[in-house]
Image (spheres, helix red, strand yellow):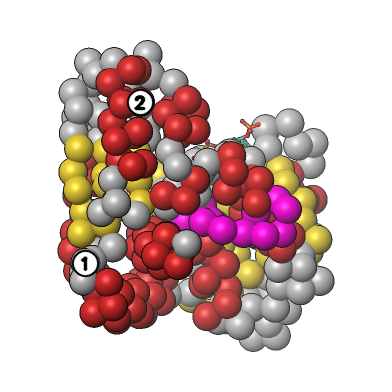
Amino acid sequence: MSASNHPLILDGKAVAARVRADVAQRVREFVALHGRAPGLAVVQVGQDPASSVYVRNKKKACAEAGIQSFSHDPPATVTRQELLALVDLLNRDSQVDGILVQLPLPAGLDANEIMDAIDPHKDVDGFHPTNTGLLAQKRPALRPCTPYGVMRLAQEYAIPLSGARATVVGASNIVGRPMALELLLAGCTVTVCHTRTRDLAAEVARADVVVAAIGKPQMIPGAWIKPGAAVFDVGINRLADGTLVGDVDFAGASLRAGWITPVPGGAGPMTIAMLLSNTLEAALRRMAR
Ligand code: NDP
């Protein structure tokens, strides 16, 4: 792919800022037309400290984009019936365009059951089986934010995807699987790897596009990267000394890659930007229905 000896660092912070500014502009147009702001209901069950940080960041990003957020913070002791009733209420609330239930849920609550109860038209995380199914059927509606953010980064940097060999390492419902579907939609020939993959090194080494979504610090050494490949590192791992690193050995991979995302500052900032974009999209689609 890229012939350069030096990789182009994919600046997720800068691209995310552009996406957020664009959303803010379109939100102003939405308000002028409809007399209200797009609304995002943010449900946090319990007080998990990491979730609290994510939720706070999401609400702050909403405010900056002019999106109204509605907080719902039931205690960890909330019952399944109470939580389903809350989701039902939000599904029917005309001020609410998007519903986000922060994961993980406390033990005893079935996340699948709760997510399945969200109106797919308000599923701004893109995790509902209907939205995953639509993506699988080449007719995407609301798309999972992290893979969608990777695609937006690739688009911004004009990384050639059509016909490229792509390897996704990680097969979770929220990142790996929808990532594979996005890359397939973009015309890549896609391989998806997981814990039972026999020769991970070989699968990565033949890829023009690598997406790492494993959750293991620096598990992919630079030597595996095909020269010139585009490397998207979705992993976020905190080391004992507090440093954040990805799933790829950034220093080693930088010697070979054509493009590479840093951690932090690569795929991470794109996720929130795409959440805002999805909320606006959901609001526009609802008003058009
Ligand atoms: P999961 O733990 O749900 O999935 C990890 C995947 O990696 C699984 O499919 C697993 O395989 C695979 N895997 C684990 N170990 C290996 C291995 N040794 N070799 C090959 N495959 C392996 O994680 P998530 O998908 O939720 O998250 C992945 C990473 O992305 C995490 O670091 C997370 O923090 C980060 N993340 C970042 C986001 C962002 O905004 N940038 C958003 C969401 C996540 P198997 O299926 O066989 O178990």
- Which x, y percent locates residue 57? 23, 54
- Which x, y percent locates residue 198? 79, 36
Task: Check if mark 2's residue and mark 1's residue have beta carbons within 8 Å.
Answer: no
Amino acid residing under circle 2: Leu
Left or right of 213: which side holds 266? left
Q: Is mark 1 within 8 Å of ligand 1?
A: no
Using the image as rendered, state which of residue 100 and residue 171 is in the foreground: 100
Residue indicated by mark 2? 84
Instruction: State the mark number for residue 36.
Output: 1
Depicted 59 relative to depicted 259: above or below: above
Q: Residues within 10 Å of mark 1 (few under 14, many from 20)?
A: some
Residue drawn at the location 34% of the way across and 74% of the way down:
23
Quarter of the image for residue 34 reads: bottom left
Left or right of 98: which side holds 148? right
- Which x, y percent locates residue 78? 24, 19
Q: Is residue 140 magenta?
A: yes
**Real-space CA distance between mark 2 and mark 1, rounded to the nearest whole angstrom:** 27 Å
Please report the bounds of the magenta region as a residue range.
135-147
Ligand 1's image quarter is top right
